[in-house]
């Protein structure tokens, strides 16, 4: 009886972990007055097939994404995307919003990978050693059945590191 109880508890524990999909963001170190790459990815453990997503990137004052002349965040498509289109914008809160869609309903490639990457800039008025908490929030993924699945917000750390060259 004890053996059956232990096996049942182990199976229930695996089922709980197996259904958890999440967004991944690693901590990043940005050189003072310089740039660093931030990668935003996912892990799919539920068996759902996702074709798109939307999320906001909230950064502290003094750290921002590299933007073009129209103040649109520059973005690089990650290896988890096939024919997907990424539309970046800046929302009224000042956060960057990223919308990832496939007009052919192409699924994300694999069960984990990088959705996109952005370049972060650290203002020269910050100090080496400054640490901030940033977040990816308002996360929603869309399945092939056009079901919108909300994900938990993800916090990550940004540390300002020594400059790699002269700070201008």
Image: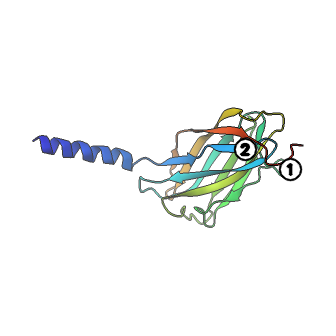
For residue 70, the mark is 1
**x and y percentages locating residue 22 in the rendered image:** 50, 47
Rendered location of residue 40, percent (x, y): 61, 50
Circle 2: is it few (<14), some (14-19), or many (20+) Cα within 10 Å?
many
Which residue is depicted at the point 19% across and 42% down?
Answer: 6
> Tag 1's secondary structure?
loop
Q: Is residue 41 above or below residue 139?
A: below
Left or right side of 103 for 128? right
Q: Position of residue 138 (x, y in %)?
A: 60, 40
In the figure, residue 128 lies in which quadrant?
top right
Against 100, residue 6 (above or below) is above
Real-space CA distance between mark 1 and mark 2, rounded to the nearest whole angstrom? 24 Å
Q: For the C terminus, give its image quadrant.
A: top right
Question: Residue 91, percent across and down?
Answer: 74, 40
Q: Is residue 121 left or right of residue 115?
A: right
In the rendered structure, the answer to whether residue 86 lies left or right of residue 145 reads: right
* Mark 2, secondary structure of its residue: strand
Q: Earlier in the sequence, mark 1 or mark 2?
A: 2
Residue at 67% x, 54% y: name it. 117
Q: How is the image coloured?
A: rainbow
Residues 148 and 59: in front is 59
Seen in the picture, residue 114 relative to 137 is either above or below; the reply is: below
* Residue occupied by mark 2: 30
Tell me which corner region of the image, top left, top right, bottom left or bottom right, holds residue 61. top right
Q: Residue furthest right?
A: 168
Give the quarter of the image for residue 102: bottom right
């Amino acid at each position: 009886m004890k053996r059956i109880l232990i096996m049942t508890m182990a199976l229930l524990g695996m089922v709980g972990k197996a259904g958890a999909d999440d967004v991944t963001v690693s901590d990043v170190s940005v050189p003072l007055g310089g740039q660093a790459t931030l990668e935003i990815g996912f892990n799919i453990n539920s068996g759902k097939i996702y074709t798109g997503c939307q999320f906001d990137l909230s950064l502290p004052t003094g750290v921002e994404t590299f933007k073009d002349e129209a103040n649109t965040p520059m973005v690089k498509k990650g290896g988890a995307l096939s024919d997907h289109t990424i539309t970046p914008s800046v929302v009224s809160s000042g956060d960057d919003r990223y919308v990832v869609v496939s007009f052919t309903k192409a699924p994300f490639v694999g069960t984990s990978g990088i959705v996109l990457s952005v370049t972060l800039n650290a203002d020269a008025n910050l100090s080496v050693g400054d640490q901030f908490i940033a977040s990816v929030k308002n996360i929603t993924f869309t399945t092939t059945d056009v079901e919108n699945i909300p994900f938990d917000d993800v916090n990550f750390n940004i540390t300002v590191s020594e400059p790699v060259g002269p700070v201008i």
